[in-house]
């Protein structure tokens, strides 16, 4: 099997129209996990959605790694629909 390496960097920008930046990035080099959460184009709470993505996804990976499982993790903090 061949191996390769990737260097990553993250930068977000609110753009010329928005007053706030709704985008988020997160990198876990140890696991090779990169998350890019694009805001919701000015929709209400787009920054909240981006932040939920970059906090819940790594948390789920951590739980799966500890359990030595693959599959789905549900977060008791959120409704069934959100999970």
Image (cartoon, rainbow, N blue to C red):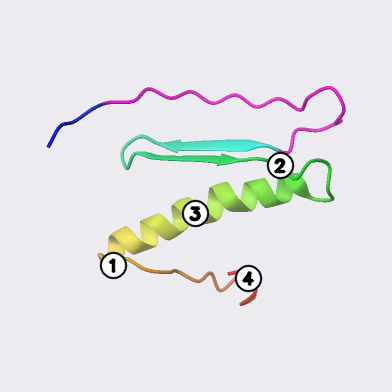
Q: Which residues are magenta?
A: 5-22
Question: Quadrant of the rendered structure where residue 15 is?
Answer: top right
Closer to viewer: mark 3 or mark 2: 2
Q: In the structure shown, which secondary structural element does the residue marked by tag 2 occupy? A: loop
Q: First in sequence, mark 1 or 4: give its number.
A: 1
**Residue that badge 3 annotates:** 57
Foreground mark, 1 or 4? 1
Residue located at (76% from left, 28% from top):
14
Number of other residues with Cα within 10 Å of mark 3, as a class: few under 14, some 14 to 19, many 20 or more:
some
Task: Name the quadrant of the N terminus.
Answer: top left
Q: Residue 78 bears which disc, if any? A: 4
29 vs 44, left or right, is left
What residue is drawn where x is 56% and y is 36%? 25
Distance from Cα at disc 2 to Cα at disc 1: 30 Å
Q: Tell me where residue 76 sits by quadrant.
A: bottom right
Label placed on residue 39: 2
């Amino acid at each position: 099997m061949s191996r390769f390496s990737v260097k990553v960097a993250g930068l977000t920008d609110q753009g010329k129209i928005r007053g706030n930046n709704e985008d988020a990035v997160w990198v876990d080099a140890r696991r090779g996990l990169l998350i890019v959460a694009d805001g919701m184009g000015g929709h209400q709470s787009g920054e909240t959605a981006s932040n939920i993505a970059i906090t819940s996804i790594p948390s789920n990976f951590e739980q799966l790694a500890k359990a030595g499982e693959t599959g789905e993790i549900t977060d008791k903090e959120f409704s069934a629909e959100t999970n």
